[in-house]
Amino acid sequence: MTQKSDRQLGMGRAISRRDFVQGSSVALAAALAPRLDAANPGTAGGVAGAQAPAYYPPTRTGMRGSHPGSYEVAHALARQGAQFDDATDTGEHYDLVIVGAGISGLAAAHYYRQRFGDDARILLLDNHDDFGGHAKRNEFHQGGSMVLALGGTHNLEWWQFSETVQDFMATYGVDIEAMRQKMEFNYGEDAPNSPAMWFDESSYGVNRLIPRCHLSHQLTPETIDQIPISEAGRESLKTFYARQDNLFAGLGKADVEALLAEISYPDFLRQYGGLTEDAVQLFHNMEHGSWGIETRALSAGEALWDGNPGIHLLGEPWPDEERNYPVAMWPDGNASLVRLMVAGLIPKVAPDATPDNIALARFNYEHLDQTGHSVRLRLNATVVNAENTETGVAMTYVEDGQLKRVTARHGVLACYHSVIPHLCPTLSDRQREALQYQVKIPLLLTNVLIRNTQALDKLGIDAVNFPGRLHGRFFLFRGISTGGYQHAMENDGPVSLVFWGSISPPEDAIDLKSQLRGSRQKLLQLTFEDFEREVRTVLDGLLGPAGFDVNEDILAITVNRWPHGYSYEYMDLWDPDFAEGEAPHEIARRPFGAMTIANSDAGASAYTHVAIDQAWRAISELPDARVPDA
């Protein structure tokens, strides 16, 4: 095996002058008056000679998500016990201060105005350089046309919406049916040879692409014979996939459910599926994208519920291979929803924004935090203390290295549960313990803008799983034409490859929370160069034989690193059955003084509609009467 050097992989290679000029001019046009679409590159009118705004983070590449500068202050507070004293009082006083400008924080601002009036003075403080939290907008221009991609939160599971969320979406003009009609994207499972699996030389001794191979589909013996594991491992797979019987025919339904809830999925594959260790290894990172965890953290019941193979051992037929997950999506994920919310709360930021043009609408960040606006959004501001006072609340935050303090009548904490005990040291021990129970699940989306899809088209693939690599899989992201943006499935121009998943925890991390903390630490230790080297290595080995040149065909890389990603959900193997009202997230979200808590953690479920529901609850729990001004 010959390992290519960084130079051969194109590490650190500057973008060619042609790409730089095209990308810069289009980025300028898009930021000022974006009428671009991916099907009509370079068609921005009426902006000749204009100057770009000084601040527009969606076009930033490199390390994003929890980017450098967004977490260091919070880590000093939570990990090193740093003290933040002697804050300068800004003299600002609001009706409401919200910690966090993600979906839940923005929704809390919406509901506060709904309850207390549009003239309510609201300040949102966020530690990131952009709004939206996990709904991060990734905007590329390096290939000559604007290409949008996923930076984090990206689905609307509309069938789970409460009436509250349905009304919220209607307020912002979100038309699920129309979005669905303009969505061809299917998580990269439409190409003739997709989904596929790729086995890399460093992990398996050979670079091998196996088309039409997905472990959740019933594999044929011919396909299994191509998998580069031991002969015994292949034979165990053949036996497993060929079986069609009920191993638990003598047990009642409740007994079977109890059994499946008490055994991990890998142990189920070993004990009841008869798989060898090298065969079981193939399944380890299958849930890195959807659950964000290793399959060893899932019970057999949870894994089977999510469509992993094994249901045929319970006498059930193999499921239809056709994927049917009817979500609604924008071309930048739920970043478009966030943009609609920001435009509604602070109209001057995007005065012309509508649901029909939101993906292309001009956003001027200079208007986010302006005196005189009823709602203000302050980025790069990390809150380090939140306390109740005789007249409401006081929030202390760090901005540009300066410690500052603002006051308000009410406060909403729309940040991670795990940081709140450090922000509010006077909380009761019971509530502090409940807040720290939930350990967030790391998430990773690495977008690689490629010049075209010729190599993938030649191979007939648009989604590939990698059992031996850092990212669990990638898929081509195109085929969503909403919000004014156009990027058809047949488009042959620049496109984003989304590498989606998490980071495998250390082998010696046994319980779930140790696994999550181990994954987080590994994720934080990886540099952008580590991710760049990884994606270049994968694309060279997988697509190089089909003509892909990693030196010429990679136009940009954006790493959306979320060490605190998905909200913690209670799991069969690790959490007890809590009495109603006594689950940790229910205790954790209880109001205290003039403050309440809004986030998806408070619903113990990592979905956009949960974040909105929890924002509504948080605002409804605030004291009825406004506290008089100080």
Image (tube, rainbow, N blue to C red):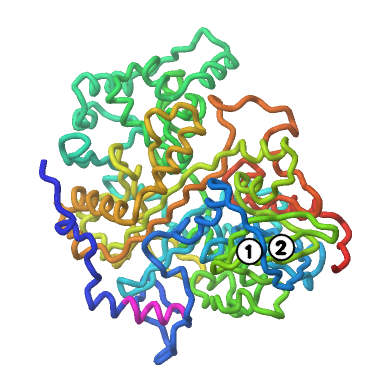
> Residue at image x 77%, y 59%?
393
Image marks 2 and 1: residues in contact by CB distance under 8 Å: yes
Quadrant assignment, res 551? bottom left
Q: Is residue 423 positioned above or below 557 on the image? A: above
Where's residue 273, x and y in %? 37, 18
> Residue at image x 30%, y 66%?
494
Where's residue 105, x and y in %? 65, 58
Quadrant assignment, res 106? bottom right
Q: Is residue 153 visible?
A: yes
Residue type highlighted by circle 2? Val
The mark found on residue 125 in the picture is 1
Q: Is residue 169 visible?
A: no
**Which element carries disc 1, helix, strand or loop?**
strand
Residue found at the very far top of the displayed protein: 250
Q: For residue 24: magenta? A: yes
Residue found at the very far front of the displayed protein: 86
**Which element carries disc 2, helix, strand or loop?**
strand
Which secondary structure dominates the residues rendered in magenta?
helix
Q: Is residue 371 positioned above or below 593 on the image? A: below
- C-alpha separation, residue under disc 2 versus residue under disc 1: 7 Å
Of 577 and 452, the residue lying toward us: 577
Of 167 and 87, the residue lying toward us: 87
> Residue at image x 78%, y 54%?
388
Residue under numbered circle 2: 97
Q: For residue 4: magenta? A: no
Q: How many marks?
A: 2
Residue type highlighted by circle 1? Leu
Residue found at the very far left of the displayed protein: 2
Where's residue 87, x and y in %? 67, 64
Where's residue 39, x and y in %? 36, 71
Q: Which residues are magenta?
A: 23-31
For the N terminus, the image quarter is top left
